[in-house]
Amino acid sequence: MEFQPPHPEHADRVSIRKLEGPEPIGSAFLPPGEPKGGKFYLEPFEDIKIVAGEEWLVKCVLPRHGVAVIYGKSQSFKSFVALDLGFRVAAGWAWAGLKVMQASVIYIAAEGAVGVRKRKVGWTLQNPNIPSPCPFRLISAAPNLGSADGDLPALIESVEAEGIAPGVIFIDTLAQTLGGADENGAGMIQYVANAQALSKRFGCLVVIIHHVGLSDEERLRGHSSLHGAIDAQILCERASGTLTTNLKIQKLKDEDAGRTFSATLSRVVIGHDEDGDEVSTLVVDSVIEQMDARGGKPKSARIPKQQRLLMDVIEFMITECGFDFRPYPDGPSVRAVSDNLVRREYLTRLADTEAPTEAQKKAFRRSINAIIEGRLVGAAEQRGERVIWIL
């Protein structure tokens, strides 16, 4: 009997395919032999085995099958990390020094496909000698996976029509592929069922990119069914004001969670626009597992709350009001912003009243001087006004 993965509406119905020779049982494997006298095969104790090397996509980080989540706050670099993982799986290259099983990759860029294209160009400039053809495919659309009558069948049909057997499917992001359904109720439950059905259909890992909760920055946003159903959960926490994000494995079935990695990014110029200005993007340069002097997992350095707020404000204002600025005559341009604009935005967020207090103004001056001295940001004068940029 041929294996037909269950539709999310009928997840309790199980089919079994015939395999040649004894093979292991489990979420990633189907039992050997033909069922005797019924639909369900009762596998003898002696036949229950595993196949070495088939358990991991990225050893002890991402399983070969099931559903995983990479999540974090906005601008925590979670999508950059996911894309780097996808490229490395497609190329069969190690990640953080860990063994990677080469597999075909499908990346659903439901949020910012243009950015993904730029990052691909930057990544290839940083990482030459990529195998050709590279088994990586991009979908620049947002399938509706939040309802039973959504786009799951069409997505499966499109993948099968290309003759691709994906080893991992990235969905970036959950919010953009929920189809307007209720993230805190039935919509999330159905989404989980669809992700599991997608994984079972192709015998692959489905990696969902998601956001943190509104009141808790170390939990997944939305209904608890997501956390209960996933096989791996990785939190991205950006070190404020830097191009580094810490990756914490919060959940990993059958393995020890709690391992922490540090991913460092760099900016790569990929070309010039019609005005001759540089076009650039960020790519992951390196990923290193963090260890303390005793071989354990280190605690992240604590940054004062007001400095974290100030760095968030600077990043926001550079995005909203930034301009090209060349700190040194022979150096590259950076995106900078007026110190006065940052101060006004910072005090607006900090003040409980319309008029900031003198204490809050002094707090701003202390914080801005501290991050300049700590070389988190650079500062210079331009036409009698101080401008700042992130180093």
Image (cartoon, rainbow, N blue to C red):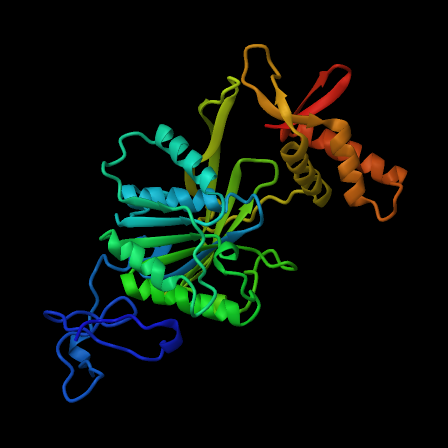
Quadrant of res 134: top left
Considering every residue shown, the one lying at the far bottom of the view is 37
Q: Is residue 232 above or below residue 16?
A: above
Residue 213 location (% of width, % of height):
60, 59
Q: Is residue 126 above or below residue 229?
A: above
Quadrant of res 387: top right
Quarter of the image with the C terminus in it: top right
Determine whether, in the image, residue 351 is placed left or right of residue 119.
Answer: right
Q: What is the number of callouts on the image? A: 0
Residue at 36% from the left image edge and 28% from the top image edge? 125
Q: Nearer the viewer, residue 163 or 38?
A: 163
Residue 300 location (% of width, % of height):
57, 46
Determine whether, in the image, residue 380 is placed left or right of residue 264.
Answer: right
Q: Nearer the viewer, residue 295 or 234?
A: 234
Q: Nearer the viewer, residue 334 or 361?
A: 334
Q: Nearer the viewer, residue 13 or 101?
A: 13
Residue at 49% from the left image edge and 57% from the top image edge? 174
